[in-house]
Image: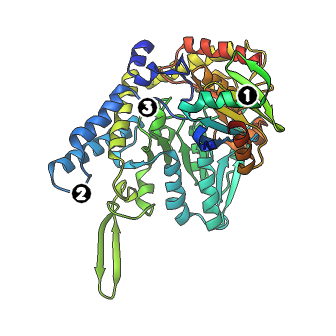
Amino acid sequence: MATVEDYVARIEGTCGEEKDVIVVFKYDKKDEAIARILKKAQLKNTIAGIIFELTFQDASFRVYSNGKAIFRSIKNKQELNNLLANLLL
Amino acid sequence: MDIQAIRQDFPILKRQINNNPLIYFDNAATTQKPRQVIDAVSDYYENHNGNVHRAVHTLSLEATDFYEKSREKIAKFINAKESAELVFVRGTTEAINLVAYSWGLSNLRKGDEVLVSLMEHHSNIVPWEIISKLRDFTIKYANINADGTLDYDDFESKFSSKTKIACLSHVSNVTGIINDVKRIAKVAHDNGALMLVDGAQSVPHLPVNVQDLDMDFLAFSGHKMLGPTGIGALYGKMELLEKMGPFQGGGEMVKEVEFSQGKGCSIIWNDPPWKFEAGTPNIGGAVGLAEAVRYLEAIGMNEVISHEKELTKYAVERMQECSKVTIHGSLDLSKKCGIIPFSVKDLSSHDVALICDNYGIMIRSGYHCAQPLHQQILKLHSSDRASFYIYNTREEIDRFVEVLKEIEHL
């Protein structure tokens, strides 16, 4: 059974007041991860097919075709894990 | 200065990132390494590796020779009076911590004051805050003008007979502004205080002469000047290093550890710089840093800064074509190194950095370890930063501006 860890290589907090969270997908799984996310989340905007601005369950985030996603206003690790599980699995 | 020839020395610059040629504009964080440095470190480990100062066998003697000659080379680069004034450390952060703990714990007490500017990197704030809790002295913070330049009047007015040390970066890691550390050092000395300079962003980019600038301490990192990570240096005037106690205990930093019944343990410290280098040092790192110094000297530090200023001028002009891009801090290029902090309207700094990454352009986003400067002075939540070095070109800046213009349409 697939898990979030199958797709996610690393989660990094950023510095700056925004406190964004950057999710880095595993290189060999990034295309699959992005495809799954695009299938489930609502697409708000796309730029040149490399940046996808999305919403899902009240969360807004951007996915980059190089295999990274930036999530905003995430309260804690549990919330992010739940969100990623719902998007990826 | 033949940039194309220089670029050939850097293997990583041949890389593609996200199907684009790598454009590396995060040099204030760390620099790329030329083949000469990589080869020098490999050669040391392949042919000469041994532990220093410890044995009489050939490899130990060779390693010691490499290590001490590296110290000599780097000490001359900053014009120290003698190589023993240069202590090898992990980097700027450890160098400042060394002074804070070794000098600060013994010399600072209640009623004393340490003077620090608000533009400092956290590594020149946090060690002093930690020590102030242990010794109960006061830290005074000197103001910065709205354009990110040092408020010299405020800094100088905060000196008093209570001031024991002034701590200031030579070049801001956020704005690239060059501070007149010679002027502040003179005021510090006139008030009986010492002067510590954070040279992390100046030693790699400008000619730095510790005797002319009359610094008491200078801290800098190898990895920001083409050298390996995990190696840096603290310069200290010999008369100060001689009086200071050790920073860490262990082998190498002692002459004698004698134990006698009834008297216990009696220890005689080694002489500077070894008194401050407990345990096996980063010998390969020191060799790599010395090779980096050789590389920079072959170019010439005046050439280095002149190239960076020329690139900065060009980048500022081109970035000003972008209607949503704001460049922060003073644009007086006569007092600035190759660092440009900026923001793009309506986008977070991390978004801008991630989009640039998509195009193979590496820039930094966030506070750049200088939260007080961002919040108190620049009034920013965070910023993006492009920073240049010897291998960067105008063509790379053109590509960067093209990407910024695309970002504006988001």
Give the residue at the far right of this rendering.
Answer: A58
| Chain letter for mark 3 | B
Q: Which circle marks residue B226 in the picture?
A: 3
> Residue placed farthest to the front in the image?
A1
Q: Residue furthest left?
A: B57
Residue B400: name its quadrant: top right
Residue drawn at (37%, 53%), measured in percent from left and top?
B273
x 25%, y 54%: residue: B53
* Amino acid tagged 2: Arg
The residue wearing badge 1 is A39
Compared with B277, B180 (above or below) is above
SS for callout 3: loop
- Drawn side of residue B338 relative to residue B231, left or right: right
Percent across and percent down for residue B138 are: 69, 60
Q: Which mark is nearer the camera, 3 or 1?
A: 1
**Whole-percent x, y for residue B176 in the image:** 62, 30
The answer for how far apart the CA atoms under marks 3 and 2 are is 29 Å
Q: Amino acid at mark 1?
A: Lys
- The numbered mark at residue B54 is 2
Point 42% across, 37% down: residue: B78
Mark closest to the chain's N terminus, 3 or 2: 2
Q: Is residue B279 left or right of residue A85?
A: left
Quadrant of image for the C terminus of chain B: top right
Lateral position of residue B17 relative to residue B249, left or right: right
Q: Is residue B271 above or below residue B284?
A: below
Instruction: Read off the chain for label 1.
Output: A
What amino acid type is highlighted by mark number 3? Leu
> Looking at this view, is B117 or B37 the one in front?
B37
Task: List x then y, in percent, for residue B329.
Answer: 71, 29
